[in-house]
């Protein structure tokens, strides 16, 4: 009986705390109702009407606009079942999602007192920070004190006020993003995969969030289809997603994407391996393209690709008429003096102990690599 009372008391206390926190947020918003109304009116001028071309009349968003938007977003999330995470859990997830495997060529960060802007810059614009409060961009705003994230939270998009009564109407995508990332809601992941795939694409491509296999599967397949339909066919661009420079200027390898490719490579499926092989030929070692990677970083990329390609090549070659049609592996052509002529890659691999891949070490040092067919491939892209 005593144990039951303790458990009941603990559960009741937890519910009470959650309700108090929810009520506290609502009370704060009600106190700011006049301020919210003021900024809603101001935000009506972020775009000028056709009859008003005087840019002096255009309203420029401020930090206060985004702070108010963040508070309304938090309240709306709570009304939709969002559980505010602990500080440590939220901070770790933000770091894992946005600051671990980011591609620094298309991301950047700007910290404010009460929020942080993660710039999404796939076109690599030079003055991207000038677009921080531009609603036509897909920048992401993280509120560490509120423990939520949002797109640009324009007040008139998320709330309405009638007779001093505030009603919050959040976009379902914002609800699903927060509940998936910070409440681990798989139901909301399913929603995002159907209704908000571009956001997941941004997380994977720009920030390197590759910890969810379902996201890896769907986005990687979509990208492959997209690149394959380009003229000329450009599936080799898949490599640009797996191997990037982070904001410390170092090579970042999206290892979970590689694991997905390895897991899904089979007798009848060499599409990703073939794309990565073409990436090595057309992009990584293409002298007409300035590479961001050093010779040692290139060798590390080769090691990661070869550790998947070579075992699969030797296992499946000749078993399918539609796959594994190359006469030798990418590494063979790369180092061979009669083809791509980069024998130095073998020395770099050896210097780094084959980047920790014992199979690769054995394959090269036993002479198996040199025993691969010397017949040139049908495709002469390596030249």
Image (spheres, grey):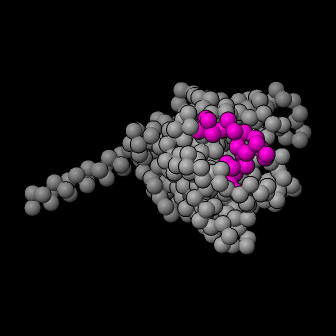
The tally of labels here is 0
Residue furthest out toward the left = 1
Q: Is residue 292 visible?
A: yes
Q: Which of 139/45 is in front?
A: 139
Residue at x-position 39% and y-position 38%: 88
Q: Is residue 169 visible?
A: no
x and y percentages locating residue 195 in the rendered image: 64, 61
Image coordinates for residue 147, horizontal then vertical, percent? 47, 41
Q: Quadrant of residue 58?
A: top right
Judging depth in this view, the residue of 304 and 49 nearest the camera is: 304
Residue 51 in the figure: left or right of residue 332:
right
Residue at (53%, 30%) from the top-left corner?
114
Front residue (pair 358, 368): 368
| Residue under the point 60% across and 53% down | 368
Of residues 31 and 298, the one drawn nearer to the viewer in this rendering: 298
Q: Is residue 333 above or below residue 288?
A: below
Magenta stretch holds residue 335:
yes
Q: Quadrant of the N terminus?
A: bottom left
Report which quarter residue 119 is drawn in: top right
What residue is shown at x 49% (from left), y 42% (from top)? 356
């Amino acid at each position: 009986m005593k144990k039951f009372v303790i458990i009941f008391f603990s559960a009741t206390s937890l519910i009470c705390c959650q309700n108090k926190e929810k009520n506290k947020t609502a009370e704060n918003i009600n106190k700011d109702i006049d301020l919210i109304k003021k900024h809603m009116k101001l935000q009506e001028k972020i775009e000028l009407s056709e009859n008003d071309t005087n840019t002096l009349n255009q309203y420029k968003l401020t930090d206060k606009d985004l702070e108010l938007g963040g508070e309304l977003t938090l309240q709306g999330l709570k009304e939709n079942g969002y559980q505010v995470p602990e500080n440590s859990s939220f901070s770790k997830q933000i770091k894992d999602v946005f600051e671990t495997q980011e591609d620094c060529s298309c991301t950047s960060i700007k910290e404010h007192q009460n929020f942080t802007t993660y710039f999404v810059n796939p076109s690599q614009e030079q003055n991207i920070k000038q677009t921080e409060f531009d609603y036509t961009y897909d920048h992401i705003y993280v509120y560490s004190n509120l423990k939520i994230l949002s797109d640009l939270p324009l007040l008139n998009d998320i709330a309405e006020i009638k007779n001093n009564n505030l009603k919050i109407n959040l976009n379902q995508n914002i609800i699903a993003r927060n509940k998936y990332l910070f409440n681990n809601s798989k139901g909301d992941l399913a929603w995002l995969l159907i209704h908000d795939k571009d956001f997941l694409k941004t997380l994977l491509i720009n920030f390197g969030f590759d910890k969810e296999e379902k996201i890896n599967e769907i986005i990687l397949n979509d990208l492959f289809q997209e690149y394959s339909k380009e003229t000329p066919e450009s599936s080799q661009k898949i490599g640009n997603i797996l191997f990037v420079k982070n904001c410390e200027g170092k090579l970042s390898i999206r290892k979970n994407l590689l694991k997905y490719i390895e897991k899904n490579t089979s007798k009848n499926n060499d599409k990703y391996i073939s794309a990565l092989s073409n990436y090595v030929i057309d992009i990584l070692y293409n002298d007409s393209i300035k590479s961001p990677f050093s010779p040692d970083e290139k060798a590390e990329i080769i090691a990661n690709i070869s550790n998947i390609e070579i075992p699969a090549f030797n296992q499946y070659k000749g078993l399918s008429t539609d796959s594994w049609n190359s006469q030798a592996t990418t590494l063979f052509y790369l180092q061979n003096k009669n083809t791509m002529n980069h024998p130095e890659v073998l020395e770099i691999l050896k210097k780094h102990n084959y980047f920790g891949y014992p199979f690769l070490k054995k394959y090269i040092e036993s002479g198996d690599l040199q025993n691969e067919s010397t017949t040139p491939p049908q495709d002469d892209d390596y030249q």
